[in-house]
Image: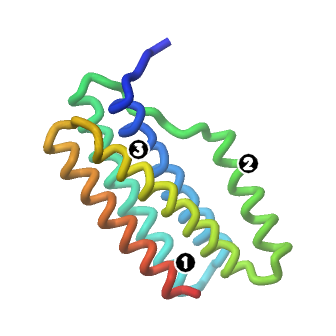
């Protein structure tokens, strides 16, 4: 078992949430089908995956292994989000709300990681992810 210190755990939490939110955007885009918001979600997913890959490189630089999300947990979360969206009567609003919650968790995790004593290159990647998450939050707010 690999023991991680607080700074490693904080950065791994950001990376994991990057992949989870990207996966959620992809699933939401497929639920929406041919919709302008689906295009936005697909673009956000692609950008988020690229940022997560950049963060993984930085994680390797501090002699840690990136932590990938649990695919089974992800599948269950997507299934539950889809069911909730169908039952809500407004699938689009439900999907947007789920994505907003994911962005809030990511922003919180980024702020926690930025408080850690990390290399400047990693801080740079974290700030780019934060800017991306804040842009995603604005896009989601506009989707309401």
Q: Nearer the viewer, mark 1 or mark 3?
A: 3
Residue at 32% across / 54% down in the picture?
51
**To which residue does mark 3 refer?**
15
| Vertical relation: 116 (above or below) 75 | above
* Marked residue nearer the N-terminal end (2 or 3): 3
* Alpha-carbon span between mark 1 and mark 3: 23 Å
Decide: few, some or many residues near mark 1? Use Cα within 10 Å; few <14, some 14-19, many ≥20.
Answer: many
Q: How far is disc 2 from disc 1 in space, using C-alphas?
A: 21 Å
Q: Secondary structure at mark 3?
A: helix
- The residue where tag 1 is placed is 38
Q: Position of residue 86 (x, y in %)?
A: 81, 73
Badge 3: residue crowd in 10 Å (few <14, some 14–19, many ≥20): many
Where in the figure is residue 59, as x and y percent of width and height?
A: 29, 34
**Mark 2 residue element:** helix
**Is the residue 22 above or below the residue 117 in the image?**
below
Q: Which residue is mark 2?
A: 76
Q: Residue at left 70%, top 52%?
A: 77
């Amino acid at each position: 078992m690999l023991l991680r210190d607080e700074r490693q755990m904080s950065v791994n939490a950001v990376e994991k949430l990057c992949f989870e939110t990207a996966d959620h955007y992809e699933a939401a885009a497929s639920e929406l089908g041919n919709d302008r918001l689906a295009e936005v979600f697909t673009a956000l997913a692609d950008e988020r995956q690229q940022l997560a890959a950049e963060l993984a490189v930085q994680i390797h630089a501090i002699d840690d292994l990136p932590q990938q999300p649990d695919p089974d947990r992800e599948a269950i979360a997507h299934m539950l989000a889809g069911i909730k969206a169908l039952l809500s009567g407004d699938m689009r609003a439900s999907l947007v709300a789920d994505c907003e919650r994911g962005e809030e968790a990511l922003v919180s995790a980024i702020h926690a990681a930025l408080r850690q004593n990390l290399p400047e290159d990693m801080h740079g990647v974290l700030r780019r992810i934060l800017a991306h998450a804040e842009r995603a939050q604005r896009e989601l707010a506009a989707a309401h």
